[in-house]
Amino acid sequence: MISDAQFATHGFLPAEDPLNCFGDDSEFAPLDELGDNLPSLLEEPGFRSYARGLRIPPLPDRDPALPVLQLYYVRLGFLASAYVNQVGAEPVRNLPTNLAVPLCDVCARLKRPPILSYDGYALFNWKRFDPAGPIALGNIETVQNFVKLYDEHWFILVHVEIEAIAARLLAAFLDAEKAVIAVDRPSLDAAMQGVIGAIWEQVRVLRRIPEKMDPALYYKTFRPYIRFFEGVVYEGVDMAPFDHRGETGAQSSVVPALVAFLKIPHKPTQLTDHLADMRRYMPADHRAFLERIATIPSVRDLVDRSLFNEALEALAVFRETHLGFAREYISRWVVDPRGTGGTPYLEWLGQLIDETRAYKLV
């Protein structure tokens, strides 16, 4: 179980940097080689035939250390999504036994659905060049990718830095809780200033997306790999076809934590049902922490009005920035109007922005 102190120092990233390879002496070493070669393998039309012949080393009966489980999930999650959604071929509706069984095994141990999600694509998928340096662009690299283009690395790494900044958010939430209980207005205002500063810093990082990510390359080359599974049979596990949400930022716990802390009353709709369903794809400890944040008493009528309103505005701008990129990187190229999670994202994102601003104090 992750402690409040760990959330306050690492946010929703692992408390220790993710494992970036199993090592030559590990029984899972073949997965490192597969991961390194995956972008090249996916350029070959025979990838699926090759993948069906792979022998994936199974997990032992006794759970290995959590970082080992997470890296195993990353490697298998990428392989499965690569198999189902290979670019240049029609998506398939089956996952062969040799991939489906180990993927379902590791995902069951991690208490999550058997598909690559935001945690495997971003939270567990980075390493630092300088271990003593910050978790920030310029000092981080991805562990696993679908394509050789740096655009995909950049897309993932922007999210990793945003997640690193979120540690300041969570620390401020916990400080605010103490201040509310103590009826300490100055400390509560200070905590809210911490929230505001962190959100604006996340906006700044999010706005860097276009620096090294081309819209056409995103849509055509690697976005297809993170799409949802629709009617996919997991052979050797269950012959019933399954639908699973694809990787999406809606599976990050950062914005849901902000909504829970600020107590933004989003109207119950298909949208809120979708966002609630996205929690199934978050790590179990993150889901529990969101419930923990929801128990913090409302600060709306206690904190300085201008600070509360600025926090809402910063969140609205973050969402507007995201919406702008959704239009630039997806809707202008779109064939399927659904996002990678399988939703009508443009309409829904606009609604969230409007409801966020509507909650400001007057």
Image (cartoon, rainbow, N blue to C red):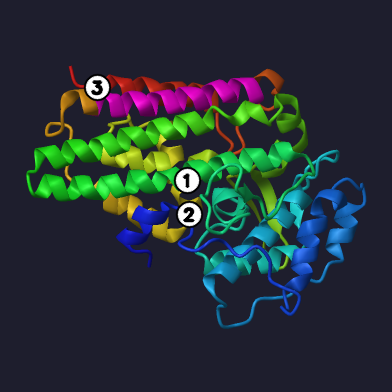
Kind of residue at disc 1: Glu
Q: Quadrant of the C terminus?
A: top left
Badge 2 crowding class, 10 Å Cα cut-off, few under 14, some 14 to 19, many 20 or more, is: many
Nearest-to-viewer mark from 3 and 2: 2
- What's drawn in magenta, residue-wise? 308-329
The structure residue drawn at horizontal position 71% and vertical position 78%, both measured from the top left corner, is 26
Q: Quadrant of the N terminus?
A: bottom left
Task: Report if residue 296 is visible in the image.
Answer: no
The structure residue drawn at horizontal position 52% and vertical position 65%, both measured from the top left corner, is 110
Checking the image for residue 163, the label placed there is 1
Give residue 45's position: percent from left, percent from top: 92, 47
Q: Which residue is mark 3?
A: 360
The mark nearer the N terminus, 2 or 1, is 2
Is residue 190 shown above or below 240? above
Q: Are marks 1 and 3 in contact (CB under 8 Å)?
A: no
Q: Which residue is mark 2?
A: 13
Badge 1 crowding class, 10 Å Cα cut-off, few under 14, some 14 to 19, many 20 or more, is: many
